[in-house]
Amino acid sequence: MSDIETVNVDGIPEDGFVLDVREDYEFEAGHVPGATHIPMAELPERFEELDPDEDVYVICRTGGRSAQASLWLTAQGYTAINVAGGSGAWIDAGKEIVSENGETPVIK
Protein backbone atom coordinates (compact mmCIF):
# COMPACT_ATOMS: atom_id res chain seq x y z
CA MET A 1 0.00 0.00 0.00
CA SER A 2 3.02 2.29 -0.03
CA ASP A 3 2.27 3.35 -3.62
CA ILE A 4 -0.59 5.61 -2.51
CA GLU A 5 -0.50 9.08 -1.10
CA THR A 6 -1.82 9.36 2.44
CA VAL A 7 -2.81 12.42 4.50
CA ASN A 8 -4.15 12.87 7.99
CA VAL A 9 -7.55 14.48 8.40
CA ASP A 10 -6.01 17.93 8.84
CA GLY A 11 -4.39 17.53 5.41
CA ILE A 12 -7.73 17.57 3.59
CA PRO A 13 -8.33 21.01 2.09
CA GLU A 14 -11.50 22.73 3.29
CA ASP A 15 -12.99 22.38 -0.20
CA GLY A 16 -11.50 18.91 -0.77
CA PHE A 17 -13.60 16.22 -2.43
CA VAL A 18 -14.16 13.45 0.14
CA LEU A 19 -15.25 10.00 -1.04
CA ASP A 20 -16.64 7.71 1.66
CA VAL A 21 -16.35 4.03 0.68
CA ARG A 22 -18.08 2.51 3.71
CA GLU A 23 -21.29 0.50 3.56
CA ASP A 24 -24.69 2.23 3.32
CA TYR A 25 -25.58 1.71 6.99
CA GLU A 26 -22.21 3.13 8.09
CA PHE A 27 -22.56 6.23 5.93
CA GLU A 28 -26.16 6.84 7.02
CA ALA A 29 -25.15 6.67 10.71
CA GLY A 30 -22.43 9.31 10.40
CA HIS A 31 -20.08 10.82 7.85
CA VAL A 32 -18.01 13.83 6.87
CA PRO A 33 -20.31 16.71 5.87
CA GLY A 34 -20.51 16.97 2.08
CA ALA A 35 -18.87 13.60 1.46
CA THR A 36 -19.82 11.63 -1.63
CA HIS A 37 -20.77 8.04 -0.91
CA ILE A 38 -19.86 5.12 -3.12
CA PRO A 39 -19.52 1.84 -1.21
CA MET A 40 -16.27 0.05 -1.97
CA ALA A 41 -18.07 -2.90 -3.57
CA GLU A 42 -19.77 -0.53 -6.04
CA LEU A 43 -16.63 1.41 -6.93
CA PRO A 44 -15.76 -0.65 -10.06
CA GLU A 45 -19.20 0.11 -11.54
CA ARG A 46 -19.46 3.73 -10.35
CA PHE A 47 -15.96 5.24 -10.36
CA GLU A 48 -16.70 7.17 -13.55
CA GLU A 49 -19.07 9.32 -11.47
CA LEU A 50 -15.89 10.90 -10.07
CA ASP A 51 -14.06 13.77 -11.76
CA PRO A 52 -10.69 12.46 -12.99
CA ASP A 53 -9.28 16.00 -12.80
CA GLU A 54 -10.08 16.42 -9.10
CA ASP A 55 -8.12 15.07 -6.14
CA VAL A 56 -10.21 12.46 -4.32
CA TYR A 57 -9.72 12.09 -0.55
CA VAL A 58 -10.88 8.55 0.21
CA ILE A 59 -12.16 7.76 3.70
CA CYS A 60 -13.60 4.75 5.50
CA ARG A 61 -13.83 3.88 9.19
CA THR A 62 -10.17 3.25 10.06
CA GLY A 63 -8.22 3.57 6.82
CA GLY A 64 -8.01 0.01 5.49
CA ARG A 65 -10.78 0.02 2.89
CA SER A 66 -9.91 3.55 1.84
CA ALA A 67 -6.29 2.50 1.25
CA GLN A 68 -7.47 -0.34 -1.01
CA ALA A 69 -9.90 1.94 -2.84
CA SER A 70 -7.22 4.63 -3.25
CA LEU A 71 -4.82 2.10 -4.73
CA TRP A 72 -7.48 0.90 -7.17
CA LEU A 73 -8.55 4.42 -8.17
CA THR A 74 -4.92 5.41 -8.70
CA ALA A 75 -4.54 2.44 -11.07
CA GLN A 76 -7.53 3.82 -13.01
CA GLY A 77 -5.76 7.17 -13.46
CA TYR A 78 -7.37 9.13 -10.61
CA THR A 79 -5.49 11.14 -8.00
CA ALA A 80 -6.76 9.28 -4.94
CA ILE A 81 -5.43 10.14 -1.51
CA ASN A 82 -6.03 7.86 1.45
CA VAL A 83 -7.21 9.52 4.68
CA ALA A 84 -5.13 7.95 7.45
CA GLY A 85 -7.18 6.76 10.41
CA GLY A 86 -10.45 7.26 8.54
CA SER A 87 -13.60 8.57 10.14
CA GLY A 88 -12.33 7.61 13.58
CA ALA A 89 -9.42 10.02 13.15
CA TRP A 90 -11.88 12.64 11.87
CA ILE A 91 -13.84 12.44 15.13
CA ASP A 92 -10.65 12.31 17.23
CA ALA A 93 -9.61 15.60 15.58
CA GLY A 94 -12.86 17.17 16.82
CA LYS A 95 -14.34 17.56 13.35
CA GLU A 96 -18.08 17.55 12.66
CA ILE A 97 -19.98 14.55 11.36
CA VAL A 98 -23.56 14.39 10.12
CA SER A 99 -26.08 11.57 9.71
CA GLU A 100 -28.62 10.71 7.05
CA ASN A 101 -31.02 8.95 9.39
CA GLY A 102 -32.15 11.83 11.62
CA GLU A 103 -30.34 10.38 14.64
CA THR A 104 -27.29 11.67 16.49
CA PRO A 105 -24.36 10.98 14.12
CA VAL A 106 -22.02 8.13 15.04
CA ILE A 107 -19.23 6.34 13.24
CA LYS A 108 -19.82 2.62 12.75
Image (cartoon, helix red, strand yellow):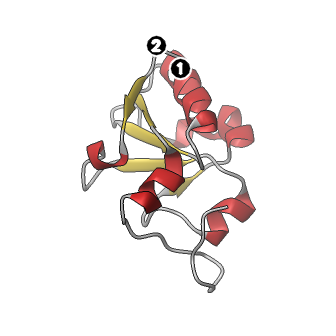
Left or right: where 43 falls relative to 25 = left
* Residue 79 appearing in the image: no
Circles 1, 2 touching at the beta carbon (< 8 Å): no
Residue 80 image position (x, y, % from top left): 43, 30
SS for dot 2? loop
Residue sitting at x 25%, y 48%: 13
Mark sitting on residue 12: none
Residue sitting at x 55%, y 39%: 63
Name the residue that disc number 1 marks: 76
Decide: few, some or many residues near mark 1? Use Cα within 10 Å; few <14, some 14-19, many ≥20. some
Left or right: where 74 falls relative to 39 = left
Residue furthest out toward the front: 92
Distance between the alpha carbons at the discs numbered 1 and 2: 14 Å
Residue sitting at x 61%, y 34%: 64
Residue sitting at x 65%, y 69%: 28
Residue 6 image position (x, y, % from top left): 40, 30
Decide: few, some or many residues near mark 2? Use Cα within 10 Å; few <14, some 14-19, many ≥20. few
Q: Is residue 37 above or below residue 106?
A: above
Of the 4 image quadrants, the one containing the N terminus is top right
Camera-side residue of 4 and 79:
4
SS for dot 1? loop
Q: Earlier in the sequence, mark 1 or mark 2?
A: 2
Amino acid under disc 2: Asp
Mark sitting on residue 3: 2
Amino acid under disc 1: Gln
Q: How many marks?
A: 2
Camera-side residue of 100 and 7:
7
